[in-house]
């Protein structure tokens, strides 16, 4: 876990924990606790579901799912469709996804899945969604109500993960504090590069440098 046990969204140089763990949390544990008949029924339904991972907007370098946790979905019977190159900017080539059971597809094929996972959920591509589909990601629901209303008007169910309540039971679904932690570290590095001084106090043979 990162950021006090709260996993982050995956990216190059960012916590390697995927958004999809929040979308389909605890499937195996759920099945193990259900009666055999109910478990079989749910497992059968899961085999008919598909999960799509389309490409992010150009400015986004994270990806909604990393290869490491693909087995948590494929093992539950879900079919995962990755748009070709969707994980490249986060440092995850297509081959790694294929090795873990994902199917490579086009953007349209990823957007046509039953469940669509995307970091920047709203924006380009959402016009391809329709009734019966589910969109999971960061929606900026409080800042883009028209876009959210448009998707809802298409009959799509939307889960805005940034609106999940901060309770103990939902800690592993956190998408805010974990990313704030990463951004904080990044901010310090940027500041250190821009500042014409050294951060720490250094005592050298030539003398002592005061901290910035």
Image: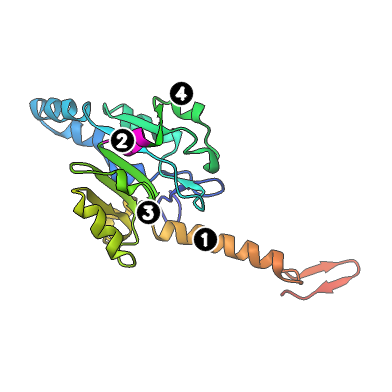
Label 4, residues with CA under 10 Å away: few <14, some 14-19, many ≥20: few
Quadrant position of the C terminus in the picture:
bottom right
Task: Name the mark nearer the viewer: 2 or 4.
Answer: 2
Residue 183's disc number: 1
The residue positioned 38% from the left and 38% from the top of the image is 53
Q: Kindly state the secondary structure of the residue where label 2 is placed.
A: strand
User: Range of the magenta residues?
Assistant: 108-113
Q: Quadrant of residue 162?
A: bottom left
* Residue at image coords 52%, 43%: 90
Q: Nearer the viewer, mark 2 or mark 3?
A: 3
Residue 169 visible in the snapshot? no
The answer for how far apart the CA atoms under marks 4 and 1 are is 31 Å
Q: Which residue is mark 4?
A: 99
Name the foreground residue: 16 vs 104.
Answer: 104
Say which label, 2 or 3, has the lower sequence index.
2
Mostly what secondary structure, the magenta segment? helix
Q: Residue at x 25, y 51 (%)?
A: 158
Residue under label 2, please give it.
Answer: 51
């Amino acid at each position: 876990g990162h950021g006090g046990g709260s996993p982050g969204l995956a990216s190059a140089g960012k916590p390697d924990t995927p958004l999809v763990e929040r979308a389909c949390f605890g499937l195996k544990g759920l099945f193990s606790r259900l009666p055999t008949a109910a478990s079989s029924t749910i497992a059968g339904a899961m085999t008919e579901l598909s999960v799509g991972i389309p490409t992010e907007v150009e400015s986004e370098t994270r990806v909604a799912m990393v290869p490491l946790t693909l087995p948590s979905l494929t093992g539950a019977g879900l079919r995962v469709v990755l748009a070709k190159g969707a994980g490249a900017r986060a440092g995850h080539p297509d081959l790694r996804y294929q090795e873990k059971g994902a199917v490579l597809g086009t953007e349209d094929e990823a957007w046509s899945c039953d469940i669509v996972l995307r970091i920047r959920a709203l924006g380009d591509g959402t016009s391809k969604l329709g009734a019966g589909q589910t969109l999971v990601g960061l929606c900026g629901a409080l800042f883009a109500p028209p876009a959210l209303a448009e998707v809802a008007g298409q009959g799509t169910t939307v889960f805005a993960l940034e609106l999940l309540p901060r309770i103990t039971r939902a800690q592993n679904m956190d998408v805010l504090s974990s990313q704030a932690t990463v951004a904080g570290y990044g901010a310090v590095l940027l500041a250190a590069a821009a500042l014409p001084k050294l951060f720490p106090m250094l005592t050298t043979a030539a003398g002592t440098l005061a901290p910035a």
